[in-house]
Image (cartoon, rainbow, N blue to C red):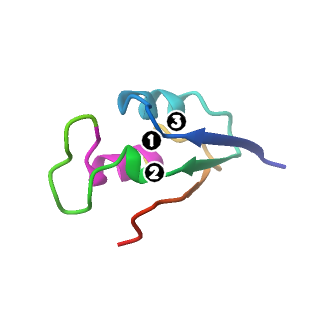
């Protein structure tokens, strides 16, 4: 089975995304609600208080993610 973590990104410090991913248990399904509140637009510089799109992908899919982590995210801006 999988552990489940529901994460609201509203008001979250962008640096905490790294910390969160680093402390997950293996085989965790992480659901980010409104990821667009934390991640800047694709192909553009990230506004203050947000992390660049490419950096977010590296954090969510990189070496900080424990083995077997599955990430699901919602957004208000599907473009």
Image quadrant assignment for residue 3: top right
- Which residue occupies 27% across, 34% down? 49
Query: What separation in Å lies between label 3 and label 2 (alpha carbons)?
Result: 14 Å
Q: Which residue is mark 3?
A: 21
Left or right of 27, for residue 20: left
Query: What separation in Å lies between label 1 and label 2 (alpha carbons)?
Result: 20 Å
In-front residue for pair 24/79: 79
- Which residue occupies 48% across, 40% down? 9
Boundaries of the magenta span? 50-61
* Residue 41 falls within the magenta-colored stretch: no
- Quarter of the image where the C terminus is located: bottom left
Earlier sequence position, callout 3 versus callout 2: 3
Left or right of 16, for residue 24: right
* Residue 59 falls within the magenta-colored stretch: yes
Q: Which residue is mark 1?
A: 63
In-front residue for pair 63/35: 35
In the rendered image of this protein, does residue 48 appear above or below residue 78?
above
Front label number (1 vs 2): 2
The image position of residue 28, as x and y in percent, is 69, 44
In-front residue for pair 43/10: 10
Query: What separation in Å lies between label 3 and label 1 (alpha carbons)?
Result: 9 Å
- Which residue occupies 44% across, 31% down? 12
Pointer 1 local density, CA inside 10 Å: few below 14, some 14–19, many at least 20: few
Q: Which residue is mark 2?
A: 35
Dot 3 falls on a residue whose secondary structure is helix
């Amino acid at each position: 089975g999988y552990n489940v973590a529901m994460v609201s990104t509203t008001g979250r410090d962008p640096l905490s995304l790294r910390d969160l991913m680093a402390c997950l248990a293996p085989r965790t399904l992480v659901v980010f609600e409104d990821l667009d509140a934390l991640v800047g637009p694709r192909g553009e510089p990230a506004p203050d208080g947000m992390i660049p799109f490419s950096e977010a992908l590296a954090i969510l899919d990189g070496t900080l993610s424990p083995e077997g982590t599955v990430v699901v995210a919602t957004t208000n801006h599907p473009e």
